[in-house]
């Protein structure tokens, strides 16, 4: 046992780094388990859109939306998500698929709406970048 204490005292910076990495891993695993929405890939998103008539919601800003968006997407920028809950209630019973540029804003939108009681929420993993990487089309208007 003294060997371990000696190692820790001689390599304290490495031990602190290891401790931080372990804490971050535990936090990531815990957040994945407790997430109330599902992260999906572009092919899974296509299936959701085609089979379950998902409502596609773009959480980017207006200029990003105009530069290219998924067909039939509704623009609701992330800062407006809380105020748009009533607008989204009319789609009750249909899955809500959120996306943004890289996946960060869509995750946040799903978190906000899940706290407001919405269920059947999905976020496009990797955002519109993964959509383009999968060679899926974008509408430019």
Image (cartoon, rainbow, N blue to C red):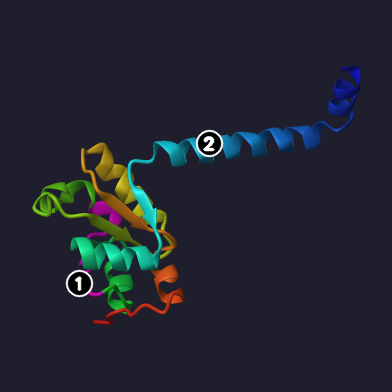
Residue 29 in the magenta stretch? The answer is no
Q: Secondary structure at mark 1?
A: loop
Q: Residue at x 61, y 34 (%)?
A: 23
How far across and how far down the image is residue 19, in percent? 69, 32
Confirm whether residue 75 shows in the render.
no
Viewer-proximal residue among 94 and 87: 94
Q: Residue at x 8, y 53 (%)?
A: 90
Q: Which residues are magenta?
A: 71-80
Q: Quadrant of the C terminus?
A: bottom left
Confirm whether residue 29 shows in the render.
yes
Left or right side of 14 for 33: left
For marks 2 and 1, the one nearer the N-term is: 2
Viewer-proximal residue among 62 and 45: 45
Q: Is residue 93 above or below residue 25?
A: below
Left or right side of 22 for 5: right
State how far apart marks 2 and 1 are (Cα).
Answer: 36 Å
How far across and how far down the image is residue 116, in percent? 22, 38
Residue under label 1, please give it: 72
Dot 2 alpha-carbon crowd within 10 angstroms: few under 14, some 14 to 19, many 20 or more: few
Residue under label 2, please give it: 27
Residue, far top: 1
How far across and how far down the image is residue 38, in percent? 36, 50
Viewer-proximal residue among 100 and 3: 3
């Amino acid at each position: 046992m003294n060997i371990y204490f000696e190692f820790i005292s001689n390599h304290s910076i490495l031990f602190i780094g290891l401790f931080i990495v372990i804490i971050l891993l535990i936090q990531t695993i815990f957040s994945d388990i407790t997430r109330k929405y599902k992260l999906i890939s572009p092919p899974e998103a296509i299936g959701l859109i085609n089979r379950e008539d998902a409502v596609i919601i773009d959480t980017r800003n207006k200029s990003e939306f105009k530069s290219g968006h998924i067909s039939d997407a509704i623009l609701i920028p992330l800062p407006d998500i809380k105020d748009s809950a009533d607008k989204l209630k009319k789609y009750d019973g249909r899955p809500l698929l959120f996306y943004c540029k890289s996946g960060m804003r869509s995750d946040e939108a799903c978190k906000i709406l899940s706290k407001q009681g919405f269920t059947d929420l999905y976020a496009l993993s990797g955002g519109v970048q993964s959509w383009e990487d999968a060679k899926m089309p974008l509408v430019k208007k």
